[in-house]
Image (cartoon, grey):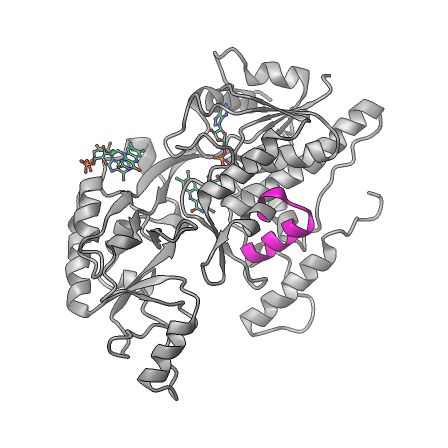
Amino acid sequence: MKEYITIIGGGLAGTEAAYQIAKAGIPVKLYEMKPKKYTPAHHSSELAEVVCSNSFKSNLLTNACGLLKEELRKLDSLLIRIADETKVPAGQALAVDREEFSQRVTEEIKNNPLIEIVSEEVGKGLPTTLSDLIKESITIVATGPLTSDPLAEEIAELTRAK
Amino acid sequence: MYFYDAAAPIVTKESIDFSVAFYGDRYSQEKKKEETMEEWKKRLAGEEPSYINLPMDQEEYETFWKALVEAEVVTLHEFEKKEIFEGCMPIEVMAKRGMDTLRFGPLKPMGFDDPRTGKRPYAVVQLRQDDKQAELYNLVGFQTNLKFGEQKRVFQLIPGLGQGDFVKYGVMHRNTYLNSPELLTETYQLKSNPNLYFAGQLTGVEGYVESISSGMVVALNTIAYYQSQKQRIDYLPITFSAYTMIGSLAKYISTPNHKFQPMNANFGILPEWEGKKIRDKKERYQKLAERSLKHLFFVPEGKK
Ligand SMILES: Cc1cc2nc3c(=O)[nH]c(=O)nc-3n(C[C@H](O)[C@H](O)[C@H](O)COP(=O)(O)OP(=O)(O)OC[C@H]3O[C@@H](n4cnc5c(N)ncnc54)[C@H](O)[C@@H]3O)c2cc1C
Ligand SMILES: Cc1cc2nc3c(=O)[nH]c(=O)nc-3n(C[C@H](O)[C@H](O)[C@H](O)COP(=O)(O)OP(=O)(O)OC[C@H]3O[C@@H](n4cnc5c(N)ncnc54)[C@H](O)[C@@H]3O)c2cc1C
């Protein structure tokens, strides 16, 4: 087993995981297909792109998503901290300046000496496949709702085979 | 495995007609009974600008509604039609359910009075700030599958948006997720291959914050798993109490479910309040939230 953890997808889940793992002193190899390839909803070359509404929903504890954010604050979430720091007025909701939010997360990940970013798409028939990666290291797939087709196909095969 | 998400259009503030539009928050904008028009306007002027509101009278609303339900939509592929995401339903689909459906949904006039008249509008479209400079605003609840040209034509019928400059149109997108209850453990680990974890929307958690929360759980668990491999000791999975939202979401997506659907954070997935029944929803949620935060760092016996 290699002495690092692999993450595929530098979106919201992938960057949070990368930060936390590096914080524990473990090296991370983060595969992100942007800026070489984009999903239909992603347009920016930054990591942690906020694709649709700029709202992270309510900040009130009496709102379920507000409670979840408060739990994440207490767990030292990088992304919620940066969301708090880049917020724009939105009543009781936590809405962010999407450009600044993604830029700040990207800087934080890029400047982390334990995180290596590999700008490459992973998937079936590509130079790097998921099956290869999981033979070598613990691997996290965080490629989101618009996971590219070669990877979606590979995941479907891997999860079908018991 | 596939379905569609919808995103709302964005307009520039510059292009909004402020002789019609007004700032205000649903919960503070309403004119109080004891307030005079003058006092009310003064109070509103002193508030932090948040939402921009576009009031409609009955005639304006009906004209808009008719145009919306008759507008041309993008043709979806057969496999795309199967499921439309309930929490993010396209506005035209909702409108087609009935003439008044929108007035009970995103265009609800509740909590708003029109500063020009002091009266309750027939319907209100809300715009939410989208960038720090407050130059861009998105149309709240207007996720749509209308063709771009049609979006411009129909949404410009909304009072205040006659000259609306749409910098981004609403679109429909694919959404891929796993059958997690069958495939994943409570720590988002693949049952059939412990070296593989999944995080984010792909696991069936739904939403930005929910995706981040799964990234957190997976990080803590891959750290534990990595250390256990390295030191050749047992892997003790790290799970959060079911009382917490972060723990409940993980539990939800990994628990067998006859019709698995992606899940937002919501109080319905937490265990019920054990004490005396609390009728008031807000009060009950407050108690559930306090209970959750108390259990966040609670480590169950035998897992220390
Ligand atoms: C159009 C749309 C609108 C949405 N609107 C909202 C909303 O308003 N509010 C809300 O709460 N949630 C919304 N969601 C749902 C969800 O919260 C977001 O999609 C969120 O970004 C999911 O986070 P994630 O980390 O799972 O994936 P993402 O943030 O999408 O990150 C995945 C990353 O993986 C990369 N990637 C994909 N395939 C590969 C590959 N094969 N190899 C390498 N890299 C790859 C992508 O480029 C991307 O950077 C929306 C989703 C979509 C699609
Ligand atoms: C996923 C996607 C995102 C896009 N994002 C933008 C954007 O943010 N800003 C922009 O100016 N242009 C965008 N475009 C380009 C857009 O398709 C049109 O070419 C352009 O806006 C001119 O519109 P129209 O009214 O002349 O054409 P229309 O006749 O309205 O549309 C032309 C084609 O655009 C696509 N389209 C239109 N509406 C939608 C929709 N709601 N969802 C998915 N596809 C649609 C369809 O393929 C359609 O056949 C995008 C295209 C796609 C496919």
Q: Which quadrant is the C terminus of chain B positioned in?
A: top right
* Side of B9 where B270 appears, left or right: right
**Magenta segment, which residues?**
A65-80
Question: Is residue A68 part of the magenta span, yes or no?
Answer: yes
The percent position of residue B56, horizontal first and vertical second, equals 22, 66
Q: Which residue occupies the extreme bottom position in the image?
A: B34
The percent position of residue B252, horizontal first and vertical second, equals 59, 46
Question: Of residues B139 and A87, which is closer to you in this image?
Answer: A87
Q: Main secondary structure of the magenta part?
A: helix
Q: Residue at x 54, y 47 (%)?
A: B209
Question: Of residues B239 and A45, which is closer to you in this image?
Answer: A45
The percent position of residue B18, horizontal first and vertical second, equals 25, 63
Against B32, residue B200 (above or below) is above
Question: Is residue A115 part of the magenta span, yes or no?
Answer: no
* Side of A22 where B64 appears, left or right: left
How many numbered markers are drawn?
A: 0
Give residue B95's quadrant in the image: bottom left
Please say whether residue B259 is visible from this viewpoint. Answer: no
Please say whether residue B74 is visible from this viewpoint. Answer: yes
Q: Residue at x 27, y 78 (%)?
A: B119
The percent position of residue B289, horizontal first and vertical second, equals 64, 61
Question: Of residues B13 and A80, which is closer to you in this image?
Answer: B13
* Side of B38 where A159 appears, left or right: right
Q: Residue at x 67, y 55 (%)?
A: B243
